Image: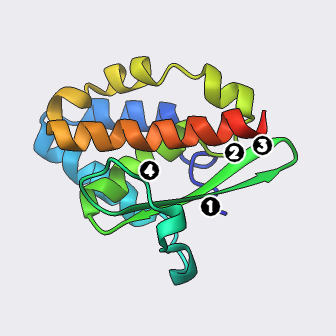
Amino acid sequence: MTQFGIEVTTDDIIDSLGFFDNWEERYKYIIDLGKELPPMPESFRSEEFLVRGCQSQVWLVDEHHDGKLFFQADSDAFIVKGLLGVVLAAFNGKTPGEILGFDVDAYFGQLDLLQHLSSTRGNGLKAMVNRIRDKAAAVR
């Protein structure tokens, strides 16, 4: 599974996005985050791993090791892959308790993210987070 979220943290993303003056530059940064996600094997691009509620196709696979959850994610849309990077930075490599206790609304607020996404993208982002939280609750 990917180390994204361990090497790239929420603080890194908050600091980097704060550096940019406008949302066009921030979107480019988010898209670049998505390019850093490792490629997902084709075998995971199946109905079983599809996240419902996203405008684009999003696949999310989880593994549980040493009390922590690790995720691999991919999408068919560049901006969504970047949003997956933002999400993985918050949750990847964390314990179920850390995942369930993380204040994702405050994190997204610090990024000033949701108000700059379409409602369908925002709903998709929430669906990704809910899927990760569901996985954490299931192994807790």
Quadrant housing residue 98: top right
* SS label for mark 3: strand
Give percent across and percent down for residue 96: 72, 33
* SS label for mark 2: loop
Q: Please name whichever residue, 108 or 131, is drawn nearer the observer in this view of the structure.
A: 131
Q: Is residue 104 visible?
A: yes
Residue 85 got which mark?
4
* SS label for mark 1: loop
Q: Is residue 88 left or right of residue 57?
A: right
CA gap between label 1 and label 2 equals 9 Å
User: As shown in the figure, which amino acid type bears the numbered disc 4?
Assistant: Gly
Q: Residue at x 43, y 54 (%)?
A: 51
* SS label for mark 4: helix
Q: Is residue 117 visible?
A: no
Give percent across and percent down for residue 78: 27, 63
Q: Mark 1 highlights which residue?
A: 2
Q: Mark 2 highlights which residue?
A: 93
